Amino acid sequence: MRWTAARRSHVVLGMTLGLMVVGAAPASGYVTESATAPPIDCVEPHGDAPAAARGGIEAHPEGFDEVSPAEALQIERDRLERLDRRGAKGKAAADVTIPVHFHVVTADDGTGDVSDAQIADQIAVLNNTFGGGESGDAADTGFSFELASTERIANRGWFRSGSTSMMRKTHVGTKAELNIWTVDFGYLGIAQFPWTKSLATDGIRVKWTTLPGGSQTNFNDGETATHEVGHWLGLYHTFQGGCKDPGDFVSDTPAQASPTSGCPVGRDSCPAEGLDPIHNYMDYSFDSCYTQFTAGQSTRMDESWLAYRG
């Protein structure tokens, strides 16, 4: 999930607490087979204010983490146990083509009615970014996407709020199918993690102006959707946990103390080896700065697919 137009920042907020709290960016949720914890979403506000001004992040007790360190460790134990039960630990998901269901939500006057061409361009962006097409050192994750359906809904309330009620009433398909809602809420995007149990709210929501050719300054190349689908496939932000182990649970993304704004080449916010991964799709950089998923992130997405979606 991402925040403001100048960056993507997420904080923890259970969906039951409400997603439109100003400045709070819910991160994707977690529920074990036996647990009843509410799902948590990854969210990002929009706008051109400096990163520190977006959403009052400093006031949140979890800082920039999507989930607390204790919860992240529990999620990881559950994920690995599930892979063991399925005999899937260390295996690749092979090539997976994900059907995509687009829900274009608009105001009553048609505001937000993204074109079929923009939808096709968004699918092309996902195929390029998940296929390693933006950089020579980017991983081809093996995931590809094809448009399965497009639904257009005129509902002013849903358009402005991007509510979970909207999702529950319009979601289609299984957890192996991606639902994308385009809305005009106060975030760049929100996603649900794969370990969240609720099928009715599974998918991603993105601000309609972030699609390719949209009007969201610095965030209109369609890579908000790439970032959110990364969460949907099990990735945390690269700055999850800050400079402390285990961070984002991916060994080849250098530790990062806080989100990136813009594209500050050479930024190094942690004492551990490696510059901040500002070009990684799971940071909060500008769309133009994004170029890669790593091999480790590809493996984590494979495992998360096999554990929760495959």
Image (cartoon, grey):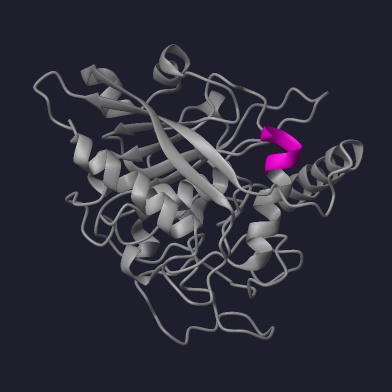
Asked if 149 appears above or below 293 in the picture, the reply is above
- Residue extent of the magenta highlight: 305-310
Residue at image location 44% in from the left, 59% down from the top = 129
- Place of residue 53 in the rendered image (x, y in percent of width and height, measured from the top left): 35, 59
Asked if 170 appears above or below 228 in the picture, the reply is above
Tell which residue pokes out farthest to the front in this image: 95
**In the visual, does 68 lie left or right of 131?**
right
**In the visual, does 129 lie left or right of 90?**
left
Q: Magenta stretch containing residue 302, yes or no?
A: no
Nearest the eye: 219 or 143: 143
Nearest the eye: 282 or 48: 282
Residue at image location 84% in from the left, 44% down from the top = 88
- Place of residue 191 in the rendered image (x, y in percent of width and height, measured from the top left): 50, 39
Residue at image location 53% in from the left, 70% down from the top = 138
Q: Quadrant of the C terminus?
A: top right
Q: Quadrant of residue 268?
A: bottom right
- Place of residue 289 in the rendered image (x, y in percent of width and height, measured from the top left): 37, 71
**In the visual, does 88 lie left or right of 281?**
right
Asked if 213 appears above or below 16 in the picture, the reply is below
Tell me, yes or no, if residue 156 can be seen here: yes
Nearest the eye: 148 or 167: 148
Q: Main secondary structure of the magenta part?
A: helix
Residue at image location 25% in from the left, 55% down from the top = 220
Q: Quadrant of residue 187?
A: top left
- Place of residue 261 in the rendered image (x, y in percent of width and height, measured from the top left): 38, 69
Asked if 47 appears above or below 233 in the picture, the reply is below
Tell me, yes or no, if residue 21 can be seen here: no
Tell which residue pokes out farthest to the top in this image: 169
